[in-house]
Structure formats: structure tokens, C-alpha cells
Image (cartoon, rainbow, N blue to C red):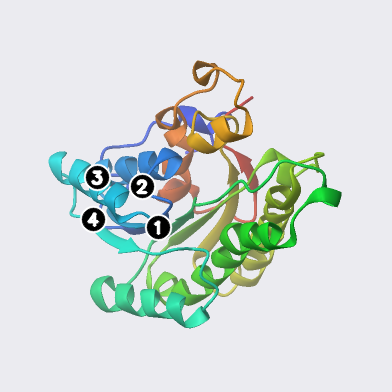
Amino acid sequence: MPQPDDLSTYQATPDLLKGKNILVTGAGAGIGRAAALSFAQHGATVILLGKTESHLSEVYDAIEANGDPQPAIVPFDLATTDESAYEDIALQLQNNLGGLHGVLHNAGILGELKPLEQYDGKTFADVLNVNLLSNFLLTKALMPSLKAAENASIIFTSSSVGRQGRAYWGAYAVAKFGIEGLMQIWADELESTSSIRVNSLNPCGTSTAMRRQAYPAESPSSTPQPEAIMGAYLFLMGDESIHINGQQLDARTR
């Protein structure tokens, strides 16, 4: 099947992800929650990773209520910089699940919207830790499980401000520029040595808590709900996208 012009319009078969194990970060709310529910509805066993266990439990309960494959919960703060903590998570998942067929790096924090000259160094570092360093550490730790799967997909979450610099977006934009570089390097390194594909996905304007934080005067109804862009996430996690690697993609046509 050719790649749709607007990924959000992709129509997935009900069993698209049957038998696949997929980890979603930031799975307790927003796009991560919608993706976790959607992946489960299409047959995946979803590993719900996030900082707030109560939010993860709500998603867990919703998946179970739908009669979808039983998910797993991994409470974890991605501000953590201890590499061994990521290795512990990876070992636990490998022991319990074996191969890992997909990772959606969705979690992130906004930081401060202000001129770089006024940016606080600690906040800058915190944003880079959550939005960039954790993506590297988690991907590295999970690599044995990803290589154990027949085909695996890694989706890094990008942003328009990580593809073209924009004033006042500070550490968030810098981290997203880093994500694009991280994606390209992983994709190039893995292309000829594994069956893992790596791409970045910009969700574009979507009605989430972070969007409201960044644009407080914007009407929530002016941007689509996370569920409206799930076609893009399903396409990239399903086997119909196995030929796509190292690409900067948008979840929908703007």
C-alpha cells in the first residue's frame, strides 16, 4: 500500500498490530493516551510508560474495558538521567515480553517561552533531559529487544519549531532539533544492520494540555483532538510502513 498523502486519513485494519508489543511514553494523557488506546484497539500489547501512575492506571482500565490485550504499566520519570535506570526497565521488559516491535517517544515538557537571553540554565537542562536525553537513553537500552523483533518501528516526536527555528521557543525547540538529528543518526546506523525503522513525526497543532500551555488564548476547538491524527501513528507502527526510514513526517496535511 502506498503512503497516504495525509497520514491522518490512513485506515488501519482491525488486526494491524496483533501480536506486537509497543511501548508508549507519556501514555497517561493527550497524544500518548490516544495512541496507547488506538494501538491496543488494533491488537497490540501496550506498555504504558509515564510519570503519573494514576493516569496510567486510567488508560490501563480503559484498555481492559474495551477487551483489548492486557497492557503493562511502567511508572517512570523521564527527567531521570541515570542510565542504569533505563537499562533496568529494558531488562524487565525483555524478560517479560521478549521482542519489542515499537516505541513511541511521545512524552515531553514545554519549558519556558521566552528569549534565550533570559532563559534559566536549570530549566534549559531539564527540558533537554526530558525531551532529548531520555529519548537517547531509552532507545539505547531497548535496542536488544527491538532487534529481537522481526520488524520494529521507532517514532520520535518532532515539532515544526524543531525543523525551523522560531523565536522564544527556547529549550523546547533546541531539543526538537536534537530529536531530528538523533532520528537521522539512528536511522542511518540501523538501516543496513537491522530490521528497525526510525522516523520523526510532527503531530502538528493538536488539542493537548501542552498546546494550551503554549497558546493560552487559542480556542481548544480550533485544533483537532489527538484521536483525529491516530492514522499517522498506526501507519508508522504497522508493517505497511516497513519501507519508510529516516523520514521527517507530519501527522496531517496542514
Where residue 56 sits: x, y (%)? 30, 51
Give the residue displayed 74% in from the left and 56% down from the top: 120
Give the residue displayed 39% in from the left and 42% down from the top: 29
The residue that mark 4 highlights is: 71
> In this rendering, which labeled residue sits more in front, label 1 or label 2?
1
In primary-sequence order, the first of circles 2 and 3 is 2
Mark 2 touching mark 3, by CB under 8 A?
yes
The residues bearing labels 2 and 4 have C-alpha atoms spaced at a distance of: 13 Å
Give the residue displayed 45% in from the left and 75% down from the top: 86
**Given the image, on which type of amino acid does mark 4 rest?**
Pro
For label 2, the SS is loop
- Label 1 neighbourhood size at 10 Å, few (<14), some (14-19), many (20+)? some
For residue 171, above or below residue 138? above
For label 4, the SS is loop
> In this rendering, which labeled residue sits more in front, label 4 or label 3?
3
Mark 4 touching mark 3, by CB under 8 A?
no
The residue that mark 1 highlights is: 51
For residue 169, above or below residue 221? below
Residue farthest along the bottom direction in this orientation: 84
**Given the image, on which type of amino acid does mark 2 rest?**
Gly
The residue that mark 3 highlights is: 58
Where residue 246 sits: x, y (%)? 64, 56
**Given the image, on which type of amino acid does mark 3 rest?**
Glu
The residues bearing labels 3 and 1 have C-alpha atoms spaced at a distance of: 13 Å
The residue that mark 2 highlights is: 28
From the viewer's perspective, is 226 left or right of 210? Answer: left
Where residue 238 sits: x, y (%)? 40, 48
In primary-sequence order, the first of circles 1 and 2 is 2
**Given the image, on which type of amino acid does mark 1 rest?**
Lys
